[in-house]
Image (cartoon, grey):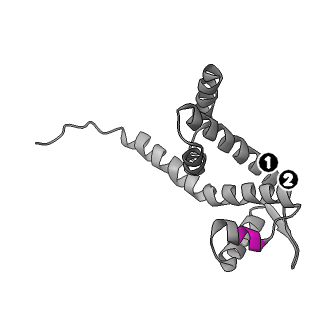
Amino acid sequence: MTSQTELADPKEQAQRFERVREAHQTETAEDYVELIADLIDANGEARVVDLAQRFGISHATVNKIITRLKKEGLVNSQPYRSLFLTEGGQKLAESCKRRHILVVKFLKCLGVSDENAEQDAEGVEHHVSEETLKAFQKFIDRSS
């Protein structure tokens, strides 16, 4: 038996997929600036070795991504020194942190465990729209 599923308009569907591709492209930068900001807040500095350890990847991979983030104007560093966020990097980190906290709170309001809420938020936070974030906040406010 075949299903009679109606497909979305091709242009609308293409726009949705484009949004997801764009989110994937920025996901790494967002994760890095958020973690760099967290490390600076917690330890007074962020080092490549710390990023490699926390992401579970090699130093070479971290260095490659840091080079990209420097070109994008999000991170500054000097040889044998800690990493620093530019003003743009700091703003992005703050926005990412805000989204992350909001998604975690929303998932917890739904009854998701702390551990799973944190883990699931790592993916959701990069793909959720501002409209959806506002709806999450309204739900949280009503549930409190």
Cβ–Cβ under 8 Å for marks 1 and 2: yes
Q: Specify few, some or many for label 1: CA neighbours under 10 Å numbering under 14, 14-19, or 20 or more.
A: some
Does residue 89 appear left or right of residue 132 in this picture?
A: right
* Residue drawn at 64 percent across, 28 percent down: 137
Left or right: residue 4 compared with residue 67: left
Which quarter of the image is occupied by the C terminus?
top right
Alpha-carbon distance for marks 1 and 2?
A: 6 Å
Residue at 59% in and 58% down: 25
Residue at horizontal 68 percent and vertical 41 percent from the top? 101
Residue 13 forms part of the magenta stretch: no
Quarter of the image with the N terminus in it: top left
Amino acid at the residue labelled 1: Lys
Q: Position of residue 68 (x, y in %)?
A: 71, 68
**Image quarter of residue 8:** top left
Quadrant for residue 114, please give it.
top right
User: In the rendered structure, which segment of residues is drawn in magenta?
Assistant: 48-52
Determine crowd level at label 2: few under 14, some 14-19, many 20+ residues with C-alpha closer than 10 A.
Answer: few
Q: Residue furthest top?
A: 142
What's the mark number on residue 87? 2
Q: Which secondary structure dominates the residues rendered in magenta?
A: helix
Task: Reply above or below: 30 against 50.
Answer: above
Q: Which residue is mark 1?
A: 91
| Depicted 122 relative to depicted 4: above or below | below
* Mark 2, secondary structure of its residue: helix
